[in-house]
Every structure is written in structure tokens, then in C-alpha cells.
Image (spheres, rainbow, N blue to C red):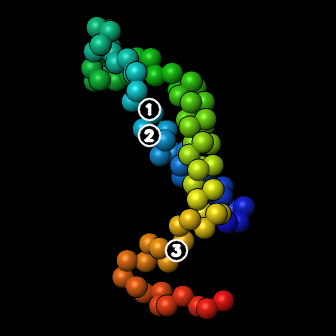
Amino acid sequence: MGITSAIVLYVVIWFLTFFVVLPVRIQTQGDLGRIVPGTQAGSPEHHHLKKKAWITTGIAAVLWAVCAYVILSGMISVRDIDMFNRMGPPSAG
């Protein structure tokens, strides 16, 4: 895995993790009973984005390390996920 693919893998994992962490412990305007006229009751009142970004960074770093280890160790290769056998037989070498 090259440096570019490692960075792309981390960014993809970070954003996927961020979208999972984003709705956790959110306080909406409807929950607090202070709905601003013209907005939805489900609009966030306190979102804590900075804290969630730091949590996401830590979780994504751990997940990235596991994925990088699996890729670099050769536990799973591209041939392992070739369901339709389009890559042909592996070369002897």
C-alpha cells in the first residue's frame, strides 16, 4: 500500500466513522422545548462537532491501523475477493 492509498483509506474511514458518530447524543430543539420559528423541531441545538471530530479521529486511527495491518500482512488480497474469477489463476512466482 502506497502513501496515497493509505491517506485515501484513512479519509474514507474517517468520514464513514464521522457519519456514524454524528447523531450520537445530539440534543434537538424539540428535546429542549425551544423551537426557533421557521426551523424543524429535530434541528440540533447542541451538536458538539469539535468533540465528535476528535472522537472520530481516534476511532478512525484504530480502524485504519487494523485495515492497514490486514492489507500489508497479506491476510486478505484482491484475489480473495474476486467472486467471479475474473483475475484468472494466480501466477507461480
- Relative to residue 34, is residue 81 drawn left or right? right
Q: Nearer the viewer, residue 43 or 82?
A: 82
Q: Is residue 5 left or right of residue 52?
A: right
> Could you say which disc has been placed on residue 19 in the image?
2
Task: Please name the residue that numbered disc 3 is placed on.
Answer: 78
Question: Crowding at label 3, few (<14), some or many (≥20) Cα neighbours within 10 Å?
Answer: few
Q: Residue at x 37, y 17 (%)?
A: 27
Question: Quadrant of the rendered structure where residue 34 is?
Answer: top left
| CB within 8 Å, label 3 to label 1 | no
**Across the whole image, how many numbered discs are drawn on residues?**
3
The CA distance from mark 3 to mark 1 is 32 Å
- Would you name the residue on which mark 1 appears? 22
Quarter of the rendering occupied by the N terminus: bottom right
Which residue is at 61% across, 91% downward? 92
Give the quadrant of residue 25.
top left
Q: Classify 10 Å Cα crowding around label 1: few (below 14), some (14-19), many (20 and above).
A: some
Residue 3: x %, y % from top left: 72, 61
Relative to 83, residue 72 above or below? above
**Eyeballing the image, is 55 above or below 7?**
above
Secondary structure category for the residue under label 1: loop
N-terminal-most mark, 3 or 1: 1
Residue type at mark 2 is: Phe
| Residue count near mark 2 (Cα–Cα under 10 Å), binned few <14, some 14–19, many ≥20 | few
Contact flag, marks 1 and 2 (Cβ < 8 Å): yes
